[in-house]
Image (spheres, rainbow, N blue to C red):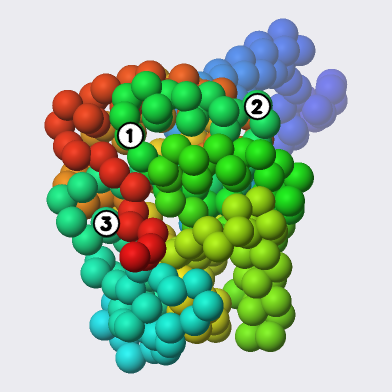
Amino acid sequence: MDHGGNGSARTGTTIRDPSAVRAVGIVVLVVTALLGTAYALGRSLVPDRPTANVTTGQHYADQPPTEDPDRPTPGDDRSTGPAVAGQDGGASPSGTPTGADGPYGTQTTSGTSQVALTFDDGPDPQYTPQVLALLREHHVRATFCVVGENAQSHPDLIRAIVADGHTLCNHSWNHDVTLGQQSPETIRADLLRTSEAIRAAVPNAPIAYYRQPGGAWTGSVVSVARELGMSPLHWTVDPVDWQTPGASRIAGMVLTNVEPGSVVLLHDAGGDRQGTVDALYEILPALTSRFKVAALPNGAT
């Protein structure tokens, strides 16, 4: 028996073929690439998780504020404040007005089958005259919720509103959406200052309503408004024209949602309101063909 020669041929170590090693490496690389491609393809087919639509607490024009869990609902004992007749002698100074089913007992309807158009934030020298002309053309009277500083700057437009038979509404001095959070004394001073600016243009003008900017009602602002003889006025239909969605969308939202007794929220100031003006070309003839459209009663006797 030969015990000589190369002993490595009989050891446990196997000499690998270099070409086989390369082939295995290539296979591993190909498989890895295929798996990576498959994962990427599968991931692309899975939709991304939708992003939450987060709203901020800031309010523009008359955007309704974020829901307040402490806000009383209609029928809550806190929902109505004292109904004390005050200097303005509002439309319903002796009690809660008809249709007072809004936040804190505010008025949301006309109380009749009539539809009421309301215009907020004016007067404005560019848009208010256009609104007045269109209302006059269609023989419609409306309610104008005016801002005190604008009334002071444009007394001629306040006189034009009253001359055409429209109803006036107090909309605070400078559209302060936080006014309701202030002390009753601060609220009262703001509302009185606004009414004084209106009456500087039209002495003894009845101011039957108050509308809180942003619809940010509180028990305090409702109580003070009523003490001053003004009915707190909310709304039924809000076409969000303050977001400038365009005339066709504004008109469509109004005409789709209006019903007998609706109070429609529109704006004649506070930004670019040409879309609102243009929407009236469609809104007014359509509404007057279906409903009686009238101003809210001004409480004058």
Q: Foreground: 195 or 217?
A: 195
Q: Quadrant of residue 301?
A: bottom left
Asked if 292 appears above or below 178 in the picture, the reply is: above
The image shows residue 53 at horizontal and vertical percentages of 52, 47
Residue 140 - label: 1
Q: Earlier in the sequence, mark 3 or mark 2?
A: 3
Gap between marks 3 and 2, in whole Å?
28 Å
Q: Amino acid at mark 1?
A: Val
Q: Does the image show residue 67? A: no
Q: Foreground: 144 or 299?
A: 299
The image shows residue 139 at horizontal and vertical percentages of 31, 29
**SS for dot 2:** loop
Asked if 95 appears above or below 191 in the picture, the reply is: below
Q: Does the image show residue 123? A: yes
Residue 126 - label: 2
Gap between marks 2 and 1, in whole Å?
20 Å
Mark whose residue sits in front, 3 or 1:
1
- Callout 3: 10 Å neighbours few (<14), some, many (20+)? many
Q: Earlier in the sequence, mark 3 or mark 1?
A: 3
**SS for dot 1:** loop
Mark whose residue sits in front, 2 or 1:
1
Identified at 64% across, 79% down, the residue is 188
The image shows residue 260 at horizontal and vertical percentages of 17, 47
Identified at 55% across, 62% down, the residue is 204
Residue 110 - label: 3
Q: Amino acid at mark 2?
A: Gln
Q: Quarter of the image for the N terminus: give it.
A: top right
- Callout 2: 10 Å neighbours few (<14), some, many (20+)? few
Q: Foreground: 257 or 297?
A: 297
Left or right position of 103 against 212: left
The image shows residue 161 at horizontal and vertical percentages of 52, 41
Q: Amino acid at mark 3?
A: Ser
